[in-house]
Amino acid sequence: MYTTWNDLYDNCMRCSKCELAAARHNIVFGVGNPNAEVMFIGEGPGEQEDLSGNPFVGRAGQLLDKMLAVVDLDRNKNIYIANIVKCRPPKNRDPKPEEQELCINWLRNQTKLIHPKIIVCLGRISAAKIIKPDIKITREHGIFFERNGTLLMATLHPAALLRNPGNKPAAMEDYFKLRSKIQEICDHTYTESQ
């Protein structure tokens, strides 16, 4: 385990543990406030993320930012966003289980250093890895689970919402539940500092 953010970042930037490293443009480490009380975790970078080195910057990221803004969350202020894998799987396929296993310690280190009170899993892959392997994202999104003092919640992936816009209202309800939970358990200055 790395004990400083800089050590973790520097070592992650040199990672070549799996086959994804060979084709990447950039490692997508994460973005946001490393002291955030809320952390969002996706599955892995897409094409735009691979090119920019930042998570959720394509169309799905733009939708995510809009949904976050509705509940006073902002990747540049009060949350942190990372992924299960730090390099783009070819053609945006799901990260293979072995790729997830080889990469997950970077995320575990990030989570340990950030020590969020709430983790939001964006989509099925992330939720299955972080919350429980058999999660049914369409039925269990918006439900809080507790593990070792941290609350975990899954919500529909923004890319899935672009494919199925009819699910946007249900996903937005998850964000309202998240805002209520933040107000309940996080520092009262958290949302007042906006």
Image (cartoon, rainbow, N blue to C red):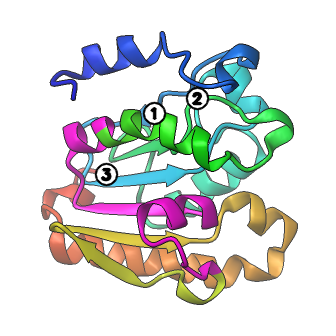
Q: Is residue 37 left or right of residue 13?
A: left
Could you tell me which secondary element the residue under label 1 belongs to? strand
* Cα–Cα span, label 3 and label 1: 18 Å
Question: Which class describes the residues within 10 Å of circle 1: few (<14), some (14-19), or many (20+)?
Answer: some
In the image, residue 121 above or below residue 132: above
Q: Which mark is residue 194?
A: 3
* Relative horizontal placement of residue 101, taking residue 21 as reference (left or right): left
> What residue is rendered at 33% in x and 79% in y?
145
Residue 54's disc number:
2
Q: Are marks 1 and 2 in contact (CB under 8 Å)?
A: yes
Whole-percent x, y for residue 166 in the image: 81, 82
Tag 1: residue type? Answer: Val
Which residue has dot 1 on it?
Answer: 31
Task: Tell me what residue is drawn at x 58 percent, y 77 percent.
Answer: 172
Q: Amino acid at mark 2?
A: Asn
Tell me: residue 137, above or below residue 88. Answer: below
Residue 50, how many percent across, how many down?
Answer: 70, 25
Q: Nearer the viewer, mark 2 or mark 3?
A: 2
Asked if one can make out residue 86 in the rendered structure from this viewpoint, the answer is: yes
Q: How many marks?
A: 3
Disc on the earlier residue, 1 or 2 = 1
Boundaries of the magenta span: 109-137
Residue type highlighted by circle 3: Gln
Residue 81 in magenta stretch: no
